[in-house]
Amino acid sequence: MDLRGLLSFYFLLLLVAQPHPGNGASSRGSIFGQRRTPAQEIGTCETTVVKQGYPCQEFYVTTKDGYILNMQRIPEGRVANGEKKQPVLLQHGIFADGMTWFTNQPEQNLPMILADNGFDVWIANTRGTRFSRRHAFLDPNTKEYWDWSWDELAANDLPAFVDFIYSQTGRKVHYVGHSLGTLTPLASFSQGLVVDKVNSAVLLSPIAYLSRVQSILLNVAANTFLGEAAGLIGIAEFNPKGDPAVDSFLRSICTSTGLNCNDLVTSLSGFNCCLNASAINNYPENEPQSTSTKNLIHLSQIIRTKVIAKFDGLLLYNLRRYGAFRPPVYNVANLPRDLPLFLGHGGNDAISDVEDVQYLISILKYHLGDNLKSLFVKDYGHFDFIRAVNAKDLVYNEVVDFFKSQK
Ligand SMILES: *[C@@H]1O[C@H](CO)[C@@H](O)[C@H](O)[C@H]1NC(C)=O
């Protein structure tokens, strides 16, 4: 293992081995009690979208398991024309929230490009991220709040977002997901969930098969650590910057090694060709956002087993939940044949490896035929698809055309 691998390992060890109850909440303001109101009032619309001249509304949507999730809606572009618009739902990936789409200038950001092209844009914020930490009865400082993985994101969060948009607009949605936001619709759609309210889907830096992940952090996590130990230690919230001790330790090793701590997730996920460092530095608070440790264990399960299946717990857990010893498998070939899909992936992505994505494409192509389009950008890493300064020219114009070609 090289130096970076070793550091990643210690980083992970430190994070998972040190319980840090409450610190994550206090550094960003506790969700329960007094800080809740300001967090709701000063959301992404006000801090980021309205300033750029776009209309924007905040919504809260409750999942069937009680999580209260924040959405933003940009109902039209800077030039309003009063037409009824086709809704598009944007779903970010892990360690991020909806703000991730707004890193760059309006002319470079996917939500604003879509709004200016006549779409009604909805931004999802996954459970556990800063504006989606409330629950009908659970406190985010408890283990129970964090007892979920991407199974629940597919079964509960995505249906809640889509159903809400449908109830507000009476229209089916186009979907755009990045990274983990591609695995969840594949899991939902393959079980027949929400797909009747989805017009088409764009999957950027898709995550499904993960047998060739090159990311040192992910491989170390998957093979040696997360699967075995983290669950036992019982850390519920995985908050990469919640603990001041972890933070200062990280900063000291970053200084001595040149690893970019301000964007640790990016620096461990492959080389991104076309990010704007000064734009990212404008939002140092945005990432990484929390996720559940169980979600990481479940992701590492895909890497270790090379199978896309529901969370594999202990025997009794599986029997109780699935009525079987083994968790059921998600079969992506169950997607409806008439669902138009667009996959965008990059040649420098250390997570969505080219061969893994090609394997996914081969399965979907066999199944969907002409309803599947794919776009390969040789120089792109995992995050270029949401943040590259040239993503409009290389990717988003094609996304807009893809949506406009659907009825
Ligand atoms: C990079 O970001 C800065 C700050 O937001 C902005 O002023 C600049 O125009 C951006 N550069 C490019 C090439 O988009």
Image (tube, grey):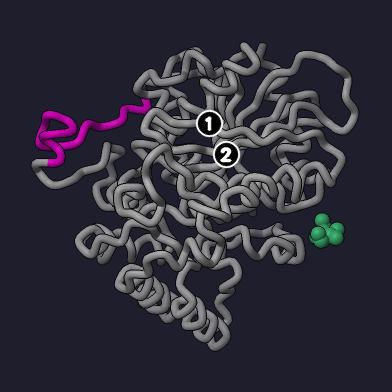
For the residue pair 351 and 379, the one nearer the viewer reads as 351
**Tag 2: residue type?**
Asn
Residue farthest front in this picture: 34
Q: Secondary structure at mark 2?
A: strand
Q: Which mark is residue 70?
A: 2
Q: Does the numbered disc 1 mark a residue whose Cβ is under 8 Å from ligand 1?
A: no
Is residue 303 among the parts visible in the rendering?
Answer: no
Q: Position of residue 363 (x, y in %)?
A: 40, 28
Residue 25 drawn above or below residue 364: below
> Could you tell whether 370 is left or right of 74 in the image?
left
Range shown magenta: 317-333
Asked if the magenta segment contains residue 324, the reply would be yes
Identity of the residue drawn at 54% across and 67% down? 27
Kindly check if marks 2 and 1 are in contact, taking CB atoms under 8 A apart as contact: yes
Classify the position of ligand 1 by quadrant: top left, top right, bottom left or bottom right: bottom right
Which quarter of the figure is the N terminus placed in?
Answer: bottom left
Please tell me whether residue 249 is drawn above or below residue 210 in the rendered image: below
Q: Residues within 10 Å of mark 1 (few under 14, many from 20)?
A: some
Label 2 to label 1: alpha-carbon separation = 6 Å
Q: Report if residue 133 lies within the magenta region.
A: no
Q: Where is the C terminus found, in terms of image quarters?
A: top right
Asked if residue 295 can be seen in this view, the reply is yes
**Residue 282 shows which numbered tag?**
none
Instruction: Characterize the local packing of mark 2: few (<14), some (14-19) or many (20 or more) Cα atoms within 10 angstroms.
Output: many
Write down the residue under mark 1. 61
The quadrant where residue 406 appears: top right
Where's residue 177, x and y in %?
55, 37
Residue situated in front as seen by the camera: 30 or 119: 30
Residue 325, given in percent of the width and then of the height, sits at 10, 36
Which residue sits at x=72%, y=19%?
Answer: 404
Question: Which residue is rendered at x = 25% and y = 42% of the image?
Answer: 311
